[in-house]
Amino acid sequence: YTADLQARRRACPGGDRLNRPALSWEGFWMLIFVRVMIARLARSFLLVPAVIGLTGILTAVVVVQIGDGLREWVELVFPTPGLPTARAVLATIAGAALTVLSLVYSLTLVVFTLAAGNISPRLLTRFTEDNVIQVTAGALAATFFYSILLLQRSDTDIDHALSTGIGVVWSVMSICLVILFIHNVATRITIDEEIARIGRSLSRHIEMLIKDSDDGTSGSCDRLDDIRPKAETTDVASVCNGYVDAIDIERLRSVAVRHDLFVEVVATPGQFVVRGCPLLSYAGELDANGRRALEAAFIISNNRTPEADLDFSILLLVEIAQRALSPGLNDGFTAIAVIDHLSGAFSKILTRPEPSSLYRDDEGTARVWCELVSVERLLGTAFHPLRRDGMTNLTVILRLLAAIGRLAIVARPIYRDVLIHHVDLIAQDGEAFDFNEDDRAELARACDRVRKALGRED
């Protein structure tokens, strides 16, 4: 996890504001700022298409410069056309590439509109990261640039066989990418497919955050009240407004070891902080440079990202389910798909010990407390809104109970009380809701089955 955060600090996608470190690190952070800007461009429709488009220009320059030296070899592969034929071929390729490029961007905007209106506005960030869209646009731009530059030099002494042959290769490759783009767009506006994509992404992020706990030990035995020093603590506040995007635990631990501190992180990833809001508190003595070093461990941006903030992907799936359960749509099957994929993601974490929130130094001394993953909070983030909004749809509630039942089979015993708590809440809401006797009995039987799977049959 620390290595991933260090890599994100070098790129920091989406981060536009950073807490500034000491002046001695200004050169380093200037490099970070440049990389941040490059990463933000990479998530847009500018950098990747521009780089690929530049490839088309360079190809045209190479063809003009070395065409004569390869004339004999080229004629074995490409036929040599006359000047009118070469001009016609290049003009046709250039016009078609520009037309299809306009179509690609138009379809992309249409997909954005459909996704924002039918699924979730927060999906737009995921669409802008789609490599298929970016590469297709770049290939069409490169084809156009290549063809138009060679068309300009068509009346000079260049090898028309090579120039038209490379143009045909660019056009064939572009058409193949357009076909892939259409397939990709068709799947991206399919709500079940997009739910599955988000579910797989959530599973990957859970794996990333808990991969260090595979040794079979659990950090749940660590209690903050038992570890926190009795000395007076000092807060380190945020210098800007925004969401906590990532926390460099290794930097916090190194500063704590160097100055003999105990650091308690208050603002976890995904939390919104305002200027002056505490990011952490520490017990011990620390100078101004050390405080700046602690500030530098936090990346703060204008929007949430899913890499270190598991709640973001969970809430994105929950939002899709809530929109589906709204009176205007009343699409219970979309909510069921969300529940199924959430259960698949949660199974990744319920089968392992909860990662410890305590980070020690090499001597075993407690140095940093940062609660990055809380199973109780993650389950509550998903199950509470689904239960509240889905109570009007018994089919959805029964599927939610079935999902908890699946998790009960694979979950470790330490998580059973959390799962039972959600079953009890569903049962209480079911008793208070205006169900008929048959529906009430079916809901009670479903709750009893899950309780039995969890080892409690009352």
Image (cartoon, rainbow, N blue to C red):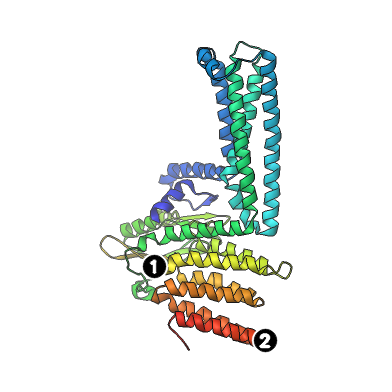
**On screen, residue 301 above or below 458:** above
Query: Which-is-in-front pick, marks 1 and 2?
Result: 2
Residue 109 in the image, given as x and y percentages of width and height: 69, 47
In the rendered image, the residue lying farthest to the left is 363
Task: Pick whichever, 68 or 436, lies toward us.
Answer: 436
Q: Quadrant of the N terminus?
A: bottom left
The numbered mark at residue 352 is: 1
The numbered mark at residue 385 is: none
Quarter where residue 356 is shown: bottom left
Dot 2 lies on which element?
loop
The amino acid type of the residue labelled 1 equals Arg
How would you rate the neighbour count of disc 1 (Cα within 10 Å): few for under 14, some for 14-19, many for 20 or more? some
Residue 412 in the image, given as x and y percentages of width and height: 39, 73
**On screen, residue 176 above or below 9:** above
How would you rate the neighbour count of disc 2 (Cα within 10 Å): few for under 14, some for 14-19, many for 20 or more? few
Task: Pick whichever, 447 or 41, lies toward us.
Answer: 447
In the image, 421: left or right of 155? left
Mark 2 lies on residue: 436
Residue 163 in the image, given as x and y percentages of width and height: 60, 20
**On screen, residue 153 above or below 246:** above
Residue 305 in the image, given as x and y percentages of width and height: 54, 56
The amino acid type of the residue labelled 2 equals Asn
Task: Give me the residue at 42% from left, 56% from top.
Answer: 248
Dot 1 lies on which element?
loop
Could you tell me if residue 238 is visible in this image?
A: no
The total of numbered circles placed on residues is: 2
CB under 8 Å between callouts 1 and 2?
no
Task: Give me the residue at 43% from left, 59% from top.
Answer: 207
Quarter where residue 322 is shown: bottom right
